[in-house]
Image (cartoon, rainbow, N blue to C red):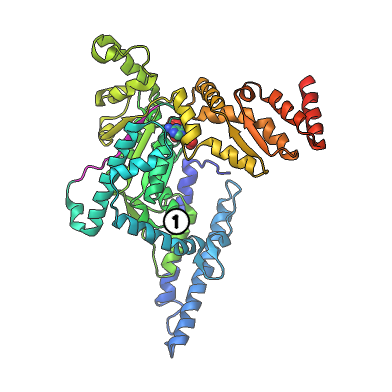
Amino acid sequence: MTEKTSYSDKKTKTLQAKKMKTTIEDDNASLHGNGLMAGAEPPANDSERKIETQNEREKIFEKIREQVTGLFFGLGGNGQTIELQQIMDPETTMPKRRRKQKNSSANGEESIRKIHEFSMKPKDIRDYLQRFVIRQEGAKKVLSVAVCDHYNHVRSCINSPEENLRDYSKPNVLLLGPTGVGKTYLIRHVAKLLGVPFVKADATKFSETGYVGNDVEDLIRNLVRNADDDAKLAQYGIIFIDEIDKIASFGGNGRDVSGRGVQVNLLKLMEDSDVNLVAPNDITAQMHVMLSFGEGKPRKETINTRHILFIVSGAFEKLNDQIRRRTAASAIGFGNRGNDSRDSDFLHLATTADFVEFGIEPEFIGRLPVRVACEQLRQEDLAQILLTSEGSILRQYESDFAGYGITLTVSDEAVDLIASMAVEEKTGARGLMTVLEKLFRDFKFYLPSTEVTMLHITKETVKNPSAALQCILHNCNSPAAESVSAEIQGMATR
Ligand SMILES: Nc1ncnc2c1ncn2[C@@H]1O[C@H](COP(=O)(O)OP(=O)(O)OP(=O)(O)O)[C@@H](O)[C@H]1O
Ligand SMILES: [Mg+2]
C-alpha cells in the first residue's frame, strides 16, 4: 500500500537523501584519494589490484548500507522499512533492476532494430487492426498514417542524425469517443504490432505539482520501466493518456484550475524535453544512481521525449452536447442530421475553438494535430465483435469451458440477442462482458462437476439461463447432474 506523503515530509526526505549522498561522495573521495588509501603501498600486480578494488567497493557498500539503514529507520514515517537486499543482489552486488535490464537487453536490441528498419505502410497497420477492432474505420486509418509518419521520421533520424535538426511537428493523436468503443484497444494493438514500449495512464491521476497526485514526468519513467529499464528503447515508445477531457481547466467536465497546470506540464513533455530518469522523491531509485557511481558505470540519467509519440483520448461527452447545440442553432447544414444519427457523431465536427471553449488550452490542443472520433457501437457491431474479432470475449468463454472438456457453441440468434442486451448497457463493447457474465455464471459453476461435454447456447438459453441449465442437467443422467439439478431447484424455491 502506498501512502501519500506530505510536502514537508518529502522535503525532509529529499534533504536527508541529499545529505546522505554528500556523505557517501565524501567517503568515496576519501577511499580513492588521500583518506583510507593514503600512504598505502601500491598493489604489486593485477590480481592484488583487483582484490584491492573489491575491498574498496565492499567498504563503500558497507558505508552505504549503514547510511541507508540509518535513513530509513530515521524516516520511519509511514512504517515502511526497506531492506537493502531489495535493492541489491548480494551475489553480484549488481542492482536487481540492472540485472533485469541486462537479461532483457536482447529483446530491447531486437525492438530497436525493428524501429531502425521500420518499413510498414499505413494499410499494413490498418489491416492488422481489422483483425481485432470492429468498425472505427476512420480512427484506424488516421492512426495508421500518424504512426507510419512518426516511425518513418524516427528511422530517418536514427540513420542520419542531422535529420534531428530539421523542423518536425509530431503527429500526436487525440482520440475522441464514448466509453468502450475501442480507443484503448486500438492503441494497445498498434503498440503491440510495432513492438515499442507502451504506457497507459489516466489524466485524472496527475496533479500540477506532483505533491498530491503523480507528476506527469512519472509517465516517462514508467515508459522506461515498461521497456525493461532500456532508456534507449523507451525514447521511441508510445504514451497513451486516457480521460484527457477530465483535465479541462473550466467548463466541460473540468475539475478546477489545476487541470490547466497539468495541461501545461504535459505539453512540455509532448515536444522536446529532457526528463530525469530518477524521480527526486524516489529514494530507492536515488540509491541505484549512487550505487552505479560506486561501480563506476553511471546509468543514463535523462531521456529525451522528442521521439515519444503521445496519444490522448477522452469521451468528451459535454463537448458532444456543446457541438450538438451549436450545429442545431445553425439550423442548416450539419444541424439537421436526421433521427438515426448516433449521439457521438457530433464529435467528428469538433473544431479547435470547440476544444478551447471546453477548457482545453490552445497550446495543448495545438500539439494534438491529429484528431479523430470513434463511433458509438450499434447492435450489429457488437454481434460482429462476438463473431469475428480475434479478441472476442466469446473466445475466452470457449476456452474457459474447454478447460473442463466442454465444447461451447452459440447460435447466431443467440449472438444477436446478446448484442441487443449489451446495447442497453450503454457501455459499448464492455456491455457484452456484463451480459455474458450473467448468462454463463451458473453454467460455469455447475457444468464442470457433471459429465456434460457440449453446451449449445440458443436464444431461449439467453432469455432464461437457469431454465436451460435445468433442462441440460435433467437430460444428463449422471448422478452428479442430478444432485446439481436438485441444488439449483432448491435455490429457485428459496
Ligand atoms: N471496436 C471494437 N472492436 C472489438 N472489440 C472492442 C471494440 N471496442 C471495444 N472492444 C472490447 O471492449 C474492451 C474495452 O474497450 P476499450 O478499453 O478500448 O474502451 P475505450 O474506448 O478505451 O473506453 P473508455 O473511454 O472507457 O476507456 C476491449 O478490451 C475490447 O475487448
Ligand atoms: Mg480507454
The answer to which image quadrant residue 464 occupies is top right
Residues in magenta, as a range? 168-177
Is residue 438 found left or right of 206 in the rendered image?
right
Against 39, residue 231 (above or below) is: above
Location of residue 456 in the rendering, given as x and y in whole percent from the top left corner: 63, 32
Is residue 400 found left or right of 139 in the rendered image?
right
Against 198, residue 254 (above or below) is: above
Is residue 171 in the magenta section? yes
- Inspect this view and state whether residue 132 appears: yes
Is residue 248 found left or right of 405 in the rendered image?
left
Q: Nearer the viewer, residue 211 or 202?
A: 202
At mark 1, the secondary structure is: loop
Against 83, residue 328 (above or below) is: above
Per the picture, the main secondary structure of the magenta-coloured stretch is loop
Location of residue 280 in the rendering, given as x and y in whole percent from the top left corner: 42, 50
Against 294, residue 417 (above or below) is: above
Residue at figure coordinates x 58%, y 27% from the top left: 435
Residue at figure coordinates x 35%, y 41% from the top left: 127
Q: Residues within 10 Å of mark 1 (few under 14, many from 20)?
A: many
Q: Nearer the viewer, residue 138 or 154?
A: 138
Count of labels in the image? 1
Location of residue 218 in the rendering, given as x and y in whole percent from the top left corner: 41, 46
Residue at figure coordinates x 58%, y 31% from the top left: 410
Residue at figure coordinates x 34%, y 56% from the top left: 114
In the picture of the structure, the residue carrying the numbered disc 1 is 228
Callout 1 amino acid: Asp
| Quadrant (top left, top right, bottom left, bottom right) of the C terminus | top right
| Quadrant (top left, top right, bottom left, bottom right) of the N terminus | top right
